[in-house]
């Protein structure tokens, strides 16, 4: 029976549960790398053997092989400093979120211009005085005409492109 007066024993190493949680977190981080596009993966600093293992994982389809490869990725991750990888991954994700937000903003403006016409155009020109009002009106008229005739939305796409370029200038 343990002595109640004795202080608890402190261990110098983390518990087995903590080590397992850490190992799973590293494995999850490695799996996040597998899901990145090639250009995004190029922005992540990592050893070449880890990069090759990540690229190899993309070509695997068999369940057993994928499970073994995930374990291998986890083992490789335990051998490197994961913090720079984690930071670079978060930067890539933040850039992606910003890109998606910008895309949605352009879509909303295009839809507003097509639905509200000159009222929305006035707001856009107040926000972006450098915009070419005549070109915007022309694109809006063409898009409305295409929509009325049931044609493919080529002018609406051109309007979207123009707005995207306009917003990227800022």
Image (cartoon, rainbow, N blue to C red):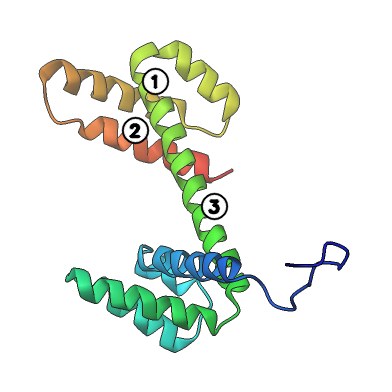
Asked if disc 2 and disc 1 are in contact, CB closer than 8 Å, the reply is yes
Residue 116 higher or lower than 110, as above or below: above
Circle 1 residues within 10 Å: few <14, some 14–19, many ≥20:
many
Which element carries disc 1, helix, strand or loop? helix
Residue at disc 3, secondary structure = helix
Residue 156 x %, y %? 28, 30
Farthest residue, direction left: 150
Q: Residue at x 51, y 16 (%)?
A: 122
Is residue 75 shown left or right of residue 84? left
Report crowding for label 2: few under 14, some 14 to 19, many 20 or more residues within 10 A (C-alpha). many
The answer to whether residue 60 of the structure is visible from this angle is: no
SS state under label 2: helix
x and y, in percent, of residue 102 in the image: 48, 40
The residue that mark 1 highlights is 113
Relative to 5, is 143 on the left or the right? Answer: left
Find the residue positioned furthest to the right. Answer: 5
Sequence-earlier tag: 3 or 1: 3
Question: How far separated are the C-alphas under marks 3 and 1?
Answer: 29 Å
Q: Nearer the viewer, residue 80 or 97?
A: 80
x 51%, y 64%: residue: 25
Query: Hey, which quadrant is residue 11 in on the image?
Result: bottom right
């Amino acid at each position: 029976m343990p002595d109640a007066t004795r202080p608890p024993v402190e261990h110098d190493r983390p518990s087995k549960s903590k080590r397992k949680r850490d190992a799973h977190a590293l494995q999850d981080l490695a799996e996040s790398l597998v899901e990145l596009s090639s250009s995004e993966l190029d922005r992540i600093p990592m050893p070449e053997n880890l990069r090759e293992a990540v690229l190899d994982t993309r070509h695997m389809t068999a369940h057993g092989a994928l499970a073994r490869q995930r374990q291998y990725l986890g083992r490789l991750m335990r051998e490197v400093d994961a913090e720079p990888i984690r930071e670079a991954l978060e930067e890539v994700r933040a850039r992606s979120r910003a890109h998606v937000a910008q895309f949605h903003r352009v879509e909303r403006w295009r839809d507003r211009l097509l639905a509200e016409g000159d009222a929305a155009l006035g707001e856009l020109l107040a926000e972006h005085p450098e915009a070419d009002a005549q070109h915007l009106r022309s694109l809006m008229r063409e898009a409305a005409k295409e929509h009325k005739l049931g044609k493919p939305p080529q002018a609406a796409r051109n309007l979207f492109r123009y707005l995207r370029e306009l917003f990227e200038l800022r």
